[in-house]
Image (cartoon, rainbow, N blue to C red):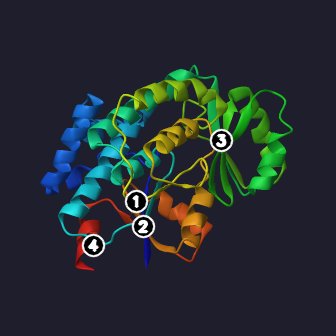
């Protein structure tokens, strides 16, 4: 079987995530300590004791999700999990977890970087100016067609999540116009997302510039497993290519549908989703029914894998 490790992005966070694995395994606690040092905050307190509102803030959610994902991975490695990935990938923020998992940078540097990424994303556009909307039931071609008719402001595709779930990002006035047009075009559901900024749009360019400066301050290594990136659906291992990809990812669509199809074409038929919740499992199943997806988050998930 061809194996890939995939890592979730923002939206997978929830209060209490990672607590069971933290309490059960010393290697998980070590990851939390390293991430706390890098991010300059108590990651255990953030993950276990925060309110949902506090944890959902972009600059909190990003280091929290990366920390939990890396803690789960550390436990798998320490306890003799034998499956080795041929490829890694992540959804948006999850690309940083994937890069860390493949040796691209340390846990501390990863936590620092995504904390800064979250801050920059939040600060790039004033609150109330931009947002994101999910469109369910229209294919990519139809969504792009509708977007061309918008006059009220800027809006673009942000995420190709599944063949019939696409997220658009842009100015609020443009979202209001396009939401009505999506409904008229036959969308099953049109949902404004609970985010405070227009992620993965050109409005994030200032945040990308600031992130590029931070990336030059930390050590990037060549990956020992290729990362299939969101921006181009290409396999990356080189540090300069990774930094350029992370820079462009900030203002480019997340091509998750193409990522999954590419990995399937390369012979991957078993995906391990490592981190909180199982959002990617649902998306992968909507993209292809020919692969198996196993979510790994809690001690019982790990025990089941090690027994198997």
Q: Name the residue under label 2.
A: 86
Q: Is mark 1 on a helix, strand or loop?
A: loop
Residue found at x 49% / y 24%: 210
Which residue extends farthest left? 26
Residue 169, above or below 141: above
- Could you tell me if the residues under marks 4 and 2 are in contact, i.e. CB atoms within 8 Å? no
Q: Label 3 neighbourhood size at 10 Å, few (<14), some (14-19), many (20+)?
A: many
Question: Sequence order check: which comes first, mark 2 or mark 1?
Answer: 2
Q: Residues within 10 Å of mark 1 (few under 14, many from 20)?
A: many
Quick one: 155 or 74, which is closer to the camera?
74
Pinpoint residue 133: horizontal percent, then vertical percent: 65, 41
> Mark 2 near mark 1, Cβ–Cβ under 8 Å?
yes
Labels 3, 2: front one: 2
List x then y, in percent, for residue 139.
75, 57
Secondary structure under the numbered disc 4 in the rendered image: loop
- Mark 1 or 3: the one toward you: 1
Residue 73 placement, left or right of 87: left
Residue 125, position as x, y percentages in the image: 58, 22
Q: In this image, 129 relative to 225: left or right? A: right
Q: Name the residue under label 3.
A: 133
Q: How far apart are marks 1 and 3 (CA)?
A: 34 Å
Gap between marks 2 and 1 measured at Cα: 6 Å
Residue under numbered circle 4: 82
For the residues labelled 3 and 2, the Cα–Cα distance comes to: 34 Å
In-image side of 136 versus 237 (left or right):
right
Q: Which mark is residue 93?
A: none
Q: Nearer the viewer, mark 4 or mark 1?
A: 1
């Amino acid at each position: 079987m061809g194996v890939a490790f995939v890592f979730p992005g923002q939206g997978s966070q929830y209060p209490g995530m990672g607590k069971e694995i933290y309490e059960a395994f010393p290697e998980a606690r070590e990851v939390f300590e390293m991430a706390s040092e890098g991010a300059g905050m108590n990651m255990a307190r953030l993950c276990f004791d925060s309110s949902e509102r506090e944890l959902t803030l972009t600059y909190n959610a990003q280091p929290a999700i990366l920390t939990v994902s890396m803690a789960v991975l550390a436990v798998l490695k320490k306890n003799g999990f034998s499956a080795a990935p041929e490829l890694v990938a992540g959804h948006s923020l999850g690309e940083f977890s994937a890069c860390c998992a493949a040796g691209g940078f340390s846990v501390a540097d990863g936590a620092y970087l995504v904390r800064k990424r979250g801050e920059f994303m939040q600060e790039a556009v004033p609150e109330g100016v931009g947002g994101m909307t999910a469109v369910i039931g229209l294919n990519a071609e139809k969504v792009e067609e509708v977007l061309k008719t918008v006059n009220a402001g800027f809006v673009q595709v942000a995420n190709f999540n599944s063949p019939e779930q696409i997220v658009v990002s842009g100015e609020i006035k443009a979202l209001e116009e396009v939401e009505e047009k999506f409904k008229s075009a036959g969308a099953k559901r049109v949902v404004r997302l609970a985010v405070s900024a227009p992620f993965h749009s050109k409005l994030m360019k200032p945040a990308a510039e600031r992130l590029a400066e931070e990336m030059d301050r930390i050590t990037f290594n060549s990956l020992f497993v290729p990362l299939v990136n969101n921006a181009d659906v290409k396999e990356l291992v080189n540090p300069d290519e990774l930094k350029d990809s992370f820079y462009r990812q900030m203002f480019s669509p997340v091509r998750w549908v193409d990522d999954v199809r590419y990995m399937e074409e390369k012979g991957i038929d078993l995906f391990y989703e490592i981190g909180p919740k199982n959002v990617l499992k649902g998306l992968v199943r909507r993209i292809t029914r020919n692969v198996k997806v196993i979510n790994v988050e809690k001690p019982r998930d790990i025990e089941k894998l090690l027994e198997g």
